[in-house]
Amino acid sequence: MHTSPLPATRRNYWNDSRSPRYSLTFAVPLLALYEGLAAALSQSNDGVRNGADVILKSAFNAAFGARGPLIFGVLLLGIFVALIMRDRRRSRDALKISTFAIMLGESVLLAGVFGVFVGLLTAQLVAPLLRLALGPLDQVAWPTALMVSLGAGLYEELLFRVILVSALLWSAKRIFGWGPVASGLFATMAGALIFSAFHYVGPYGDQLQLGSFVFRAIAGVAFSALYILRGFGITAWTHALYDVMLLAARGT
């Protein structure tokens, strides 16, 4: 019996939404939202930023001082634009607004699914589920917590998926000679543990608790798998919206 492939429109969406011209363009508004909100709140929140943002910009701060964050932002945006333009020259297809709308809908749906899946799985593994503390962020204003949540989607995905998971995948394949499945499992699990541990480091890190560590490790597995399957843009927005949903739930 012959099995037909995916319909052309669905196959095209799957491939297009992972491509740099769509994935990175989709991430640019998230970058603008986070940086704009961080700039607007800089005088009232004592310079609180997302931790992954601080790590990624630390070398630029050391090298260029106060201009470091601006230089990093210009460089990051320049890399995005260069990759987008190169991909557009290769494809020669006009960008479709409908594709971005579907990507946003997919991100919203995935954020909700992840919230239920991660919460239920954690509750099965750690009972009773310990409260997810925000550490000092419990005391900051809601706009600042929102800004940090948006930054988690962008900068934590850059640091822990684009850089870390990609490096672990490359190492497993090139150094250890593992196949794609073993390499993917190794990168996903190791990246998830490092991702979870990161949330307990620094002045705004959480108090280490088993429940919250397992919760974030499972979330790390989910986001790593999503990055491998769906690319950076959808994963970044899914993570940001997922964190915003957690923030809203804690505020109710």
Image (tube, rainbow, N blue to C red):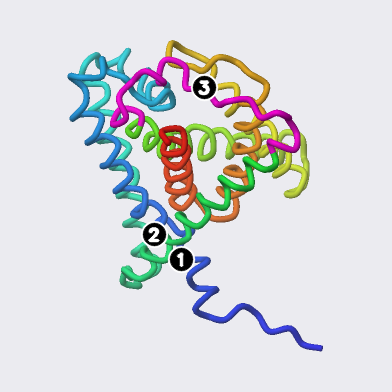
Relative to the observer, which residue lies in front, 82 or 242? 242
Q: Residue at x 54, y 22 (%)?
A: 198
Q: Which residue is mark 2?
A: 22
**Which badge, 2 or 1, comes first in the chain's sequence?**
1
* Residue 222, quarter of the rendered image: top right
Q: In screen coordinates, is 169 left or right of 91?
A: right
Q: How many residues crowd around disc 2 within 10 Å: few (fewer than 14), some, or many (20 or more)?
A: many
Cα separation between marks 3 and 1: 38 Å
Relative to the observer, which residue lies in front, 51 or 123? 123
Which amino acid, by three-letter code, is at mark 1? Asp
**Which badge, 3 or 1, comes first in the chain's sequence?**
1
**Is 43 part of what is drawn in magenta?**
no
Q: Eyeballing the image, is 196 above or below 89? A: above
Which amino acid, by three-letter code, is at mark 3? Ala
Q: Eyeballing the image, is 5 above or below 137? A: below
Label 1: element kind: helix
Point out residue 247 in the picture as x, y percentages from the top left corner: 43, 35
Q: Residue at x 75, y 34 (%)?
A: 125
Q: Residue at x 63, y 32 (%)?
A: 215
Q: Which residues are magenta?
A: 122-145
Q: How many residues crowd around disc 1 within 10 Å: few (fewer than 14), some, or many (20 or more)?
A: some
Point out residue 185 in the picture as x, y percentages from the top left corner: 73, 42
Q: Which residue is mark 1?
A: 16
Q: In screen coordinates, is 160 left or right of 86?
A: right
Label 2: element kind: helix
Relative to the observer, which residue lies in front, 16 or 198? 198
Q: Which residue is mark 3?
A: 133
Cα separation between marks 3 and 2: 35 Å
Relative to the observer, which residue lies in front, 101 or 7? 101
Cα separation between marks 2 and 1: 6 Å
